[in-house]
Structure formats: structure tokens, C-alpha cells
Image (cartoon, rainbow, N blue to C red):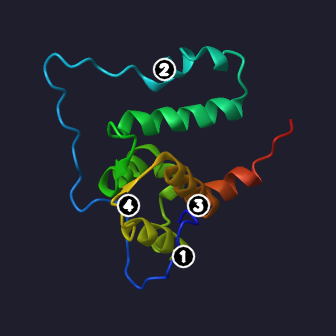
Amino acid sequence: MCGCKASVPSTKHYSVNPASPQKSPPAAAGMPKRMPIAKQLASIKALEKGSDLEKAVATAALVYNNAADPEGKLSKAETKNLLQTQFLSFIQGQENKPKYQEVISSLDEETENKIDFEDFMILLVSLTLMSDLLQEIKNMKTTK
């Protein structure tokens, strides 16, 4: 998945869809609510005049950071849940494709049981490259 170790093709079928949907735990009384991503993004002074690409990467970092544990890592289950809730348009319909299964199996085989931001971004890029949505984006006319 991340180039850190060789991916071994698997005959197992993996899906980002959890067996039973996990619900977010209710907010504890007295805990501050998280600021919406758009508001967090707007509060970053360096991005006031940032490009669309800079804002896109910053948004991915904020989404990751909001879901990560205090050490800045996500468990495999949290990663799959984040993909299901925040990246569904890119992964929808990919579950039966061998490349998709290979990427997801490499996540399942991760020995550390948690992934950091670098591995998360590599996972996003890998899933994006094989998605049907990317092909649709590529086919979109950009001129008037």
C-alpha cells in the first residue's frame, strides 16, 4: 500500500464496508464540539490566498487529524470508517476489483494496526487512481 513493504495479492475479498455500521460515540457532556472542517480551513492564515490544491491537501490533513488518536494515528477500523464516510464517491463500486482488494488487504496486513498520515495519504492516492470517479473527472470537459 505505502511502498513500505511489498503487497502480496490475496484471494480474500475485503471491503471498506464494515459488517455492522459503527456509530460515532455520543459526545461526552462538557466536551467541546469540533469546529466544522470548512471553518478550520478558513482559520488557517497561510491558506487565505491558497490555491485549490493547497486547500484540498489541507482539508485531507484536517479530516485525518480530526479522526486520529492523540498520537496522530488511525486504527484499521477507524481508517475504513473514514473512507466509508468521507471517501465513498471514490471507493463505491470498487469492492470486486482485484487492485482495490490488493490495496485493502495491504491495510488489513499492516502489522502496526495503526496508520499514520503519510500512509493514509498514500492509501487515498492509491484508491483514487483506481476509481471510476477519477476516470469520470478525466473525461470532464474543462473548457467552455
Image mark for residue 126? 3
Measure the C-alpha gap from mark 1 to mark 2: 37 Å
Earlier along the polypeptide chain: callout 1 or callout 2?
Answer: 1
Measure the C-alpha gap from mark 4 to mark 3: 14 Å
Report which residue position mark 2 lands on.
Answer: 40
Residue 98 location in percent, x, y? 52, 78
Q: Amino acid at mark 1?
A: Ala
Task: Please rate how many residues cluster around mark 1, counting C-alpha atoms within 10 Å: few if below 14, some from 14 to 19, many from 20.
Answer: few
Task: Please rate how many residues cluster around mark 2, counting C-alpha atoms within 10 Å: few if below 14, some from 14 to 19, many from 20.
Answer: few
Earlier along the polypeptide chain: callout 4 or callout 3?
Answer: 4
Report which residue position mark 4 lands on.
Answer: 16
Name the secondary structure under disc 3.
Answer: helix
Earlier along the polypeptide chain: callout 1 or callout 3?
Answer: 1
Report which residue position mark 1 lands on.
Answer: 6
- Of residues 95 and 122, the one nearer the viewer is 122
In this view, the mark in front (1 or 3)? 1
Above/below status of 14 relative to 53: below
Earlier along the polypeptide chain: callout 4 or callout 2?
Answer: 4
Above/below status of 39 relative to 98: above
Task: Please rate how many residues cluster around mark 3, counting C-alpha atoms within 10 Å: few if below 14, some from 14 to 19, many from 20.
Answer: some
